[in-house]
Image: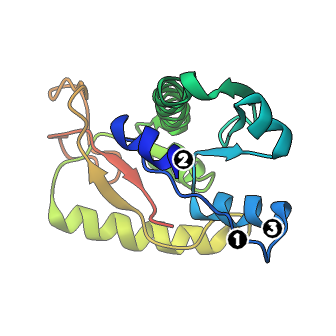
Amino acid sequence: MEFEERFGKAKVRVKVDDGKYNKPGWKFNYWELKGVPIRMELGKKDYENEEVLAVRRDTGEKLIVKWENLPKTITTLLEEMHENIFEKAKSELNGSIVDVNNWEDFMQNINKKKVCLAPWCGSPTCELNIQQKSKEGSRKDATAAIGAVKALNVPFNSSLAFNENKCFACGNPASCKPLWGRSY
C-alpha cells in the first residue's frame, strides 16, 4: 500500500489493518493494547480528501493530516510523544524519592510505596537486617505493601558528608547513600 511505502522512507513502521471482519472500535482497542503510539484512521471521506485522522495514544489528541505531510508530521508527533512520556516518568520518579535519616521515617515512606534515599554503612549484614526488619514492619501495617526492602542503587548525584551521617539502620558511620525500595 502507498502508506507503507511513504513511511518506509521516513523509517516509521506501519501496519495497515484492512480486515473486514472486525469493527473499528474493536480494531482501535486491539492496537492500543498492542502499544501502538499513533492510530491513523482512513475512511471514505478521508480518502477522497487525501487526509488521515491521527490519534495520539498518550493524550488522545486528534489531528487531521494531509497525505503529503503525513511522514513528517507523524515523525514529529513521535518525537513529541517520546519527550512527553520521558518527562512524565522522570517527574513521577523524582516525586517518589524521599530523603530520610532514621528508621521510622524510612518505614513510613516505604509503606507509602516511596523510594528512600538513606545513609548506609554498606555492610552486607546490615542490609540483611534491613531486609528482615522491613519485611516484619510491613506485616504490622495493614495498608502497606508486603515484602522486604533492598538497596536499589547509589545515584551519581548522591551527596553525603561521611563524617556527619550515620547509617539509618544500625548507627555505624555511613559510607554511601543508596536508594532503597521494594520490588513490586
Q: Which mark is residue 26?
A: 3
Please provide percent x and percent y for residue 3.
53, 44
Residues under numbered marks 1 and 2 in contact, where contact means CB atoms less than 8 Å apart: no
Pick the residue in front: 122 or 42.
42
Q: Earlier in the sequence, mark 3 or mark 1?
A: 1
Residue positioned 31% across, 54% down in the render: 152
Instruction: Tell me which corner region of the image, top left, top right, bottom left or bottom right, holds residue 49.
Output: top right
Pick the residue in front: 24 or 112.
24
Snapshot colouring: rainbow
Pick the residue in front: 45 or 110.
45
Q: Secondary structure at mark 3?
A: helix
User: Could you tell me the amino acid type at mark 1?
Assistant: Gly
User: Could you tell me the amino acid type at mark 3?
Assistant: Trp
In space, the residues marked 1 and 2 are separated at their CA atoms by 46 Å
Asked if residue 11 can be seen in this view, the reply is yes
Q: Identify the residue position indicated by label 1 in the image.
A: 19
Q: Secondary structure at mark 1?
A: loop
Residue positioned 61% across, 29% down in the render: 67
Q: Which callout, 1 or 2, points to the residue nearer the camera? A: 1
Q: Which mark is residue 114?
A: 2
Q: Is residue 169 left or right of residue 40?
A: left
Looking at the picture, does residue 124 appear above or below residue 114?
A: below
Q: Earlier in the sequence, mark 3 or mark 2?
A: 3
Instruction: Tell me which corner region of the image, top left, top right, bottom left or bottom right, holds residue 157.
Output: top left
Pick the residue in front: 89 or 169.
89
Residue positioned 44% across, 37% down in the render: 100
Q: Which callout, 3 or 2, points to the residue nearer the camera? A: 3
Mark 2 neighbour density, 10 Å: few (under 14) some (14–19) many (20 or more):
some
Q: Earlier in the sequence, mark 1 or mark 2?
A: 1
User: Could you tell me the amino acid type at mark 2?
Assistant: Lys
Q: Secondary structure at mark 2?
A: loop
